[in-house]
Image (cartoon, rainbow, N blue to C red):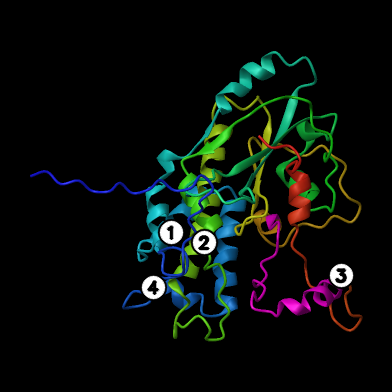
Amino acid sequence: MATSSKAEPSPHPHYVSIPDSSAEGVRAYREPAEPCPLQLTFLTEAGERAWVDEIRALLSAGQADEADKRISAELAGFEGALARLCKAATVAEVALDGWEDLPPILDEWEGPSITAITLGLTNPPDLVFEAGRTHAPELLIGLYSDEAFPFSRASKADLIAECDKELPAWVGGEEDIEFHCELTGVADVNTALINCKHRYFLRDGRDGVEGRAPGGYVEFVLANWLLATRFLQAANRVASGKDLPAGCRLIVGTVEIDADFLAVLGPDRTSTLKAAPAAAAPTQPAFATLVAKPWVPHEDPTVDAAEGAPTLRQRLRTPEATPVEPQPRAGLLARLFGRFRRA
């Protein structure tokens, strides 16, 4: 005898599924029996800062494959949701889709030759609830000629020095060329990073984990740097191929994500720009000057909301007796990569 079951009612069109704290990847995390080495390194801010600085230096020097080895080795010991997504996002799956359209576009371009391209990666989500939707990272692209800056006469060191200024000379001088491309293969990782709630480690016992940094937090840091690494690997491929204009440099970096770096790809040349009067030879490797945003501890999200207004005013006013700390340069990077022009 056949039986019938009552069909489940379809959800309301405006229904939104909001995960609770027990959902994997939101806050709940099953710690391994033995801590992974990086969990011990991240126990102190100094340990985390040193590790982050090493990965940033590799990316800033264009050594994405070496950074990939370091990050992948650390990820091997983690089995959380973020770690599994990172392991699935292999370098072969990630690409700058649409970059091959650039040569024919430039062939029809009647303006000056393109001598530099800025390429920034950012991942801000839409401020709406969209259940089940993935968010691919966004690209910020600017195409420049020597009319904005003498790129063809500048060395990589010159470009790095210009990037380090409060307002690089080429900002606002983009050529009016419509070009679109997308970083594919990392949408799941990017979406998980946007939705991740374990992005803070307060180091005061409130995380409920003793003797190690929380695994969920370490996975969040690793996933951010893996996203940046996959992006640079894709940029390295186009910089070494035939789809970059001859002699053009690619200025690559991240904008407003938790893994910041800045690198200059493409051919180098001897500078013919006028040297600064008091220029001194650097005492450290060139990539050490590429740090685009100094590492700073995350703010404590548990601060009483009632103190928000005076705290904001205090942030805008530096006490005379307090030394001024280096400030993040997200605003500079946004201008550098043409924050107002999305690919």
Tell me if residue 298 is in the magenta stretch: yes
10 Å crowding of disc 3: few (<14), some (14-19), many (20+): few
Tell me which segment is drawn in magenta: 290-316
Res. 324 in view: no
Please, what is the three-letter code of the amino acid marked with disc 4?
Cys
Task: Give the labeled residue for mark 1.
Answer: 82
Provide the secondary structure element on which disc 2 rests.
loop
Tell me if residue 157 is in the magenta stretch: no
Provide the secondary structure element on which disc 3 rests.
helix
Which numbered disc covers residue 36? Answer: 4
Q: Earlier in the sequence, mark 2 or mark 3?
A: 2
Separation (CA) of disc 4 from disc 3 = 40 Å
Provide the secondary structure element on which disc 1 rests.
helix
Q: Earlier in the sequence, mark 4 or mark 1?
A: 4
Please, what is the three-letter code of the amino acid marked with disc 1?
Leu
- Is residue 232 toward the left or the right of residue 340 in the image? left
10 Å crowding of disc 4: few (<14), some (14-19), many (20+): some
Q: Position of residue 50 (x, y in %)?
A: 58, 70
Q: Given contact means CB atoms under 8 Å apart, are the residues at marks 2 and 3 in contact?
A: no
Q: Given contact means CB atoms under 8 Å apart, are the residues at marks 1 and 2 in contact?
A: yes
Separation (CA) of disc 4 from disc 2 = 20 Å
Viewer-proximal residue among 232 and 66:
232
Which numbered disc covers residue 241? Answer: none
Please, what is the three-letter code of the amino acid marked with disc 3?
Leu
